[in-house]
Amino acid sequence: MIERTKMRTAVHFVLFLLLGATLPGCGGCSGSPAPSADSLAGLMRERGLSDDDVIAALKTYTPTGKHDTHYLMASGGHSGQLIVIGVPSMRILKYVGVFTPEPWQGYGFDDDTAKLLRDGSPPDKLLTWGDVHHPALSETKGDYDGEFVFVNDKANARIAVISLKDFNTVQIVRSGLLRSDHGGTFATPDTDYVVESGQYPVPLDNKYVPLDQSKYNETYRGAAIFWKFNRERGRIVPEESFAIELPPYMQDIADAGKFASDGWFFLNSFNTERAIGGDSEGRPPLESGASQNDMDYLHVIDWRKAEQVAKKGQTQTIGGMRLIPLKTAIAEGLLYFIPEPKSPHGVDVTPDGKDICVSGKLDTHVTVYSFEKIKQRIESKQFDGNDPYGVPILSFKDTIRGQVQVGLGPLHTQFDGAGHAYTSLFIESKVARWSLQDLKALDSIPVHFNVGHICVAGGDTAHPDGRYLVSMNKWSIDRFASVGPLLPQNFQLIDVTADKMRLLYDMPIGLGEPHYAQMISADKIKPLEFYSPVGINQVTHRADPNATTDEKKARVERHGDAVDVYMTAIRSHFVPDTIRVKQGDTVHVHLTSLEQTRDATHGFALNHYNVNLSLEPGKTANVTFVADKAGVFPIYCSEFCSALHLEMAGYLLVEPRAK
Ligand code: CUK
Ligand code: CUA
């Protein structure tokens, strides 16, 4: 590869001497050119690059027209989006609108996607942001199948379903049970369920209860919701979903068992002290109140049994959700606790499902539990007492396989296909590699800075690809040109194929704070090239009932005060291009793109009425607005679709209502 580049450079240089042509990067220089400026060695010298830098560049550089081997599905944090990134180039491929309107995609502007945002909001308040933490790719037999991604909104306790047919959101669900979620989203090995658990305990019926210690202990609760996913319909089915009531500890993130531990679910918690904060009321701040105990509780949940208990109707309905009460969960043997050190964060099940790895934020170890031992203790009912709510506690030392000393501030663990585990070290700003078999630390690499999650390709599945690791760093400090006090996060791409991990690339993320990501091999994803036949609805992926599939059928229909405009778009005109209505009319525009050419997207921007639609080839989009202001309002195509794109325009004429 290097040889070929050198050769090409030499050829260019000969041409330069013969023809007097200007070399790229040499514009404007005259007289005696620096002969090495465009040679590899010259470039390295000029730019101060080491051999390692050049190797890293060659491992990530992706020439035009060549595609990445992996997709990184990264949470978009506060942007309420999913960020799709190509690996190893780290080029951004799409921001998928999920909890936040996204004007380019028309997301949240057309009727169908506006309804998604409304369905995901409380009846009296339209939510227009989300705090996305954990994307989960749908799985079949514990491996990503490339069909769906689920994401959570920690701030508002919601889950969204994104279809990878077109990388669009198709559903947002919200229970009336939780007020925040962090333990979402985690898919069971065949995506029977997508799990969401709450973080900050609340009264589950959502009533006002004063915040004092005894009321907190008695009436505040956590819960884990098992949302039933119907793959054929591509939708979560709330009526078939159920939840389990949990004590008021702060449940954190989670993972589903597989193979050896199939049917079980593992959920971390912190603040088993049940501190309630109140630093201005004479109590310790939450952070110190919640860090008193040496151990918190790993929650071990038998979800298959819970499914049966819910089916038998041993539930009460709160906030529209079937809830298995804590007492029932204990009596039926659905819930067990195991102590875990100290202020735990990540819990990650190994590819074979045999071990469960837990990291304590204030510990220096990863603790590896053996599911075999957990199961034995549960089956023989060997418990070390109960928590204050009666949940049986298993012995820490009898259920662990061992501990690995990895460094300061371990958070999250992922796996490769070669028997290694990788753990992020927040305090040390490092990623550690260790051996799963003998629990020995092997290697570590500095990252910049304050790593949260890490993501290995397929790193939480039954068959990880390994190869690449992305370190999702919270701070970037000095890594990029400054944009003022609010700095981007830093995704660092790391090659994990060799004995020493190698840093390849820094990618600033300047839109929200991502948390987790999952990386899937590109050959598992088969997106549509365009919607076909014309007239497909983006949310249902079916023929839209209001589609106009032929320009000759474009028309305007009036029904009382409602006006339906059946409109078509094709390069480079709308039919009809003039819409005449009366002030006060409710206008429904049903716009179909007749295009069947890849990438020939049109837009529909309407002045004053806050409308923009995206019309990918073959798509039908519907929008409704009340023409309450009389006047002349230009309409134009908001995608540069053709040479006559600027001419793709028209008018909405709103005639004043007679006084
Ligand atoms: S959390 Cu952010 S670094 Cu929300 Cu999974 Cu650990
Ligand atoms: Cu159609 Cu621009």
Image (cartoon, grey):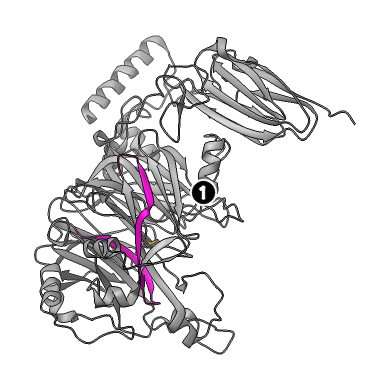
Q: Is residue 130 above or below residue 406?
A: above
Q: Residue furthest right?
A: 659
Q: Position of residue 469 (x, y in %)?
A: 27, 50
Is residue 333 one of those drawn in magenta? no
**Label 1 amino acid?**
Asp
Residue 63 is drawn in which quadrant?
top left
Residue 128 shown left or right of residue 494 in the figure? right
Q: Is mark 1 within 8 Å of ligand 1?
A: no
For the C terminus, the quadrant is top right
Q: Is residue 135 above or below residue 2?
A: below
Q: Position of residue 24 (x, y in %)?
A: 43, 23
Is residue 255 one of those drawn in magenta? yes
The residue range painted magenta reads: 231-257
Residue 255 is drawn in which quadrant?
bottom left
Q: Position of residue 597 (x, y in %)?
A: 43, 16
Residue sitting nearer the eye, 589 or 609? 589
For the N terminus, the quadrant is top left
Read off the residue under disc 1.
119
Q: Residue furthest front?
A: 312
Q: Quadrant of ligand 2?
A: top right
Q: Is residue 87 above or below residue 459?
A: above
Q: Provide the secondary structure element on which disc 1 rests.
A: helix
Mark 1, residues whose alpha carbon is within 10 Å: few (<14), some, or many (≥20)? some
Whether residue 241 is visible: yes
Residue appearing at x 18%, y 57% in the figure = 258
Q: Is residue 538 above or below residue 553?
A: below
